[in-house]
Amino acid sequence: MTARETILSFFKGKVQDGIPFSTYPTFVPRGEKGRELRNRGLILIDYRSASLSQYHNVEVEIKGAPGQLSDREKEEPYDRIWTRTYHTPMGDVSEKIRREAIYGTSEWVVEHLIKKPSDYRILQYILENCTYEENCEALKRAQSDLGEDGIVYAEVDRSPLQQLMIEWVGIERFCLDYHDCLDPMEKLLSLAQEKQDLVYNIAAHSPAEVIWAPDNLMGDVVGPALYKKYLLPFYNRQAELIHKAGKLYAVHMDGRLASLADLIKRTNIDIVDSLTLPEAGGDLPLKKALAMWKEKSILANIPAFLGHKNSNEVRRYIGGLKKDVLSFNNFAIQFSEDLPVTSLWETLSTIAETLTEKGTIVE
């Protein structure tokens, strides 16, 4: 089977000849080495936004964005903070975003849009005046470019609760406002859910086979009560829409999930994306996750610390995983963290080699 056929077959619950091994195209060395990894079974998982948003009666001002860097800055590690401000008839809100300096693949909000209760109404106005259109051509181009080397997900926004916590208010402000001004918060969440329904409908009817939500779920932050109130009904409503369209639903759940394990079992998603293993900071044993979520495909995020290990240590670690998952067919390996560029090729090559060996574990 091709790489694309292999990963789709895995997602649909069919028994595989070995453990699927996947990563994002940005993490794969270019040229001959990258081609060798693909020839040895590495599956590429790419993604494109399912829809494009357009704001009306809202002016968006961006200052200092990465795209505005000088040629010199583009050639050097940088840790630039840039600002995005939304000007509306209701008032202005702004956020500050920092792109990490080493790899340039992650951005973090260091100052959130909502800083006081009155900002909820401004953000609500922005969402009320936001429309969406399909992005099918970009998805089709990405699928054509990738071909049979992997799969292209249709990316949707984070679920409204995760958007609120991560992008709009931050955890500290969320905790305060959840107790002090819940009404405007829930009005905003309700509107965000209505908007997400539109986005998911576009995604479900896109050319993509898998709809992917980058939720970055953490049980330590969300907890069972909030998950049950906000996330469980949201995920299950979107899952019904996606499944009716014959598509699969993946959610990026890369935090500590033990407190949410039972609720995730009741969640009708198909793919748990980027599960963090205990040795990398997760709190849910792998065998327990595989057994509890046996109806779901689990893509486990291989720890980035392997990039600092020698080849024998990498072989021993991957060999141990192979032994642990012998009785399961819902486990795949995924690299979704940056690896040191100096050891990227050697680490990925050793993993690919170990996965194709017949159960050898280096002691």
Image (cartoon, grey):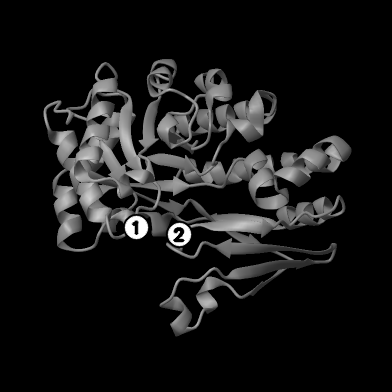
Residue 206, can we see it? no
Is label 1 in a helix, a strand or a loop? helix
Crowd around label 1: few <14 · some 14–19 · many ≥20 (10 Å):
few
Q: Are marks 1 and 2 in contact (CB under 8 Å)?
A: yes
Secondary structure, mark 2, is: loop
Determine the residue located farthest toward the left in the rendered image.
358
Quadrant position of residue 279: top left
- Tag 1: residue type? Thr
Rendered image: mark on residue 216: none
Residue 15 percent location from the top left of the image: 23, 23
Numbered badge on residue 26: 1
Residue drawn at x 74%, y 39% as measured from the top left: 190
> Which residue does the image show at 44% across and 16% down from the upper left?
292
Task: Give the answer, above or below, for where 298 lies relative to 326.
Answer: below
Residue 175 at x, y percent in the picture: 77, 39
- Number of marks present in the image shown: 2
The answer to whether 97 appears left or right of 185 in the picture is left
Residue pointed to by mark 2: 105
Relative to 90, residue 164 above or below:
above
Q: Is residue 183 left or right of residue 59?
A: right
Amino acid bearing label 2: Thr
Residue 89 location, quadrant: bottom right
